[in-house]
């Protein structure tokens, strides 16, 4: 807990709101693939098949995950005027709001791996 949070008095209502906020966050970025896709797209825009290959995700699941990320304003979809038609995906500026979450999860994951497995 940071200092701002730790000085507040916790009430049943504030805890309920905190759980709701956590649930909202998990609804947007939870699951096996969303943070992997966001991480992959941090290197720059990618075409659908390229993203599928790099993330190791099937096209059907990728399509579903990208639709959800786009619906939540984290990923943009651009249909390119090519033959055959290609689609590129990129992170939106709003996706940068997840940076602290991703960094914190990365740090925790490294610590957890060291604790459980004994090495990074």
Image: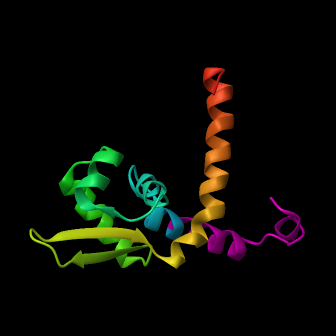
Q: Main secondary structure of the magenta part?
A: helix
* Vertical comparison of 55 with 29: above or below: above
Residue at the spot 65% in from the left edge and 54% down from the top edge: 103
Answer yes or no: is residue 118 visible.
yes
* Vertical comparison of 2 with 94: above or below: above
Asked if the magenta segment contains residue 109, the reply would be no
Which quarter shows the N terminus? Answer: bottom right
Residue at the spot 39% in from the left edge and 65% down from the top edge: 45
Residue at the spot 28% in from the left edge and 77% down from the top edge: 78
Q: Please, which residue is most extreme toward the front here?
A: 82
- Report the coloring of the rendering: rainbow
In the figure, is residue 95 to the left or right of 49?
Answer: right
Q: What range is drawn magenta here?
A: 1-23
Quarter assignment of residue 16 = bottom right
User: x and y percent of residue 89 in the render?
Assistant: 34, 68
User: x and y percent of residue 26 in the render?
Assistant: 49, 62
Residue at the spot 59% in from the left edge and 56% down from the top edge: 102
User: x and y percent of residue 52 in the render?
Assistant: 27, 51
């Amino acid at each position: 807990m940071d200092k701002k949070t730790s000085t507040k008095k916790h009430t049943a209502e504030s805890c309920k709101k905190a759980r709701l906020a956590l649930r909202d966050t998990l609804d947007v970025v939870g699951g096996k693939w969303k943070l992997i896709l966001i991480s992959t797209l941090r290197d720059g825009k990618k075409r659908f098949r390229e993203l599928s290959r790099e993330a190791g995700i099937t096209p059907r699941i990728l399509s579903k995950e990208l639709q959800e990320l786009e619906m939540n304003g984290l990923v943009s979809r651009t249909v390119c005027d090519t033959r055959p038609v290609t689609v590129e995906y990129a992170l939106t500026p709003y996706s940068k709001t997840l940076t602290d979450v991703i960094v914190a999860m990365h740090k925790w994951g490294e610590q957890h791996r060291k604790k459980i497995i004994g090495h990074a």
